[in-house]
Image: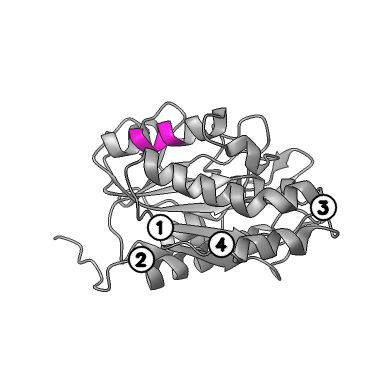
Amino acid sequence: MDSTLENVAYSPKNVFILSGQSNMAGRGGVEKHHWDGIVPNECHPDASRIFRLSAHLHYEVAREPLHHDIDAKKTCGVGPGMSFANAIKDRVEAIGLVPCAVGGTAIKEWAHGQHLYVNMVKRARAAMSHGGEIKALLWYQGESDALSQHCVDTYKANMEKLIHDVRADLHLPSLPIIQVAIASGDEKYIEKIREAQKAIDLPNVVCVDAMGLQLKGDNLHLTTESQVKLGQMLADAYLTHFAPQEPCVASS
């Protein structure tokens, strides 16, 4: 890693929170606890426009794996974040990505006051303290809730409460939320979780459907190619629903 880049102080203006569980953290290219290191062109770093908030709350040039020091107990690979950022960078200048996702986590672990929630809000506030404005929360979670009827029955209410709590704690009552409808999980409950996700009807909440994207051999995690596609789908959703309509013009 180029330390000359990492030691520069950055203050990206447009901030995006990446949160949820393993398919947001990224397992693309990971096999047997080893990441193959392959970074598609769509996920390449852009040292002048795309940054990430590290676990130590400092900005650095963003590069795969985005969640390596956040979902640190697992092996991270390619997720949707870099593809997303590269797909919006011609319309959105100075992008700050705030990775918060942790693999294997259920929605109850993201409840107000729980460690994961507290850390996500802490990181979001740190990004704001650097001068950034949070533009959206990208959320991909739910596989760990496709396990029981109780989890299914409570999922929609828990997700809606999470949205209300995040908006309240960040003082952003209209914060855009782009959630992903899951593509994998227990066959008995996956469609019920997906129905709960798609049934959330709150202002400035949109849903991107991951169903149909190719899964790895574990039938749980998206492949690298699928993560690239998902990032572009998230970008399309953001640009369509929430971004300013005029493209930004780079200063000379």
Name the residue type under label 1. Answer: Pro
Cα–Cα gap, marks 3 and 1: 32 Å
Residue corresponding to mark 1: 176
Q: Are marks 3 and 1 in contact (CB under 8 Å)?
A: no
Q: Are marks 2 and 1 in contact (CB under 8 Å)?
A: yes
Residue 106 rendering spot, x and y as whole percentages: 68, 41
Nearest to N terminus: mark 2 or mark 4: 4
Residue at image coords 71%, 62%: 183
Residue corresponding to mark 2: 242
Nearest to N terminus: mark 4 or mark 3: 4
Q: Where, quadrant-wise, is the C terminus in this rendering?
A: bottom left
Whether 125 is among the magenta residues is yes
Cα–Cα gap, marks 4 and 1: 13 Å
Name the residue type under label 3. Answer: Asp
Residue corresponding to mark 3: 218
Q: Are marks 2 and 3 in contact (CB under 8 Å)?
A: no
* Label 2 vs label 4, nearer the camera: 4
Residue corresponding to mark 4: 200
Residue at image coords 51%, 61%: 41
* Label 4 vs label 1, nearer the camera: 4
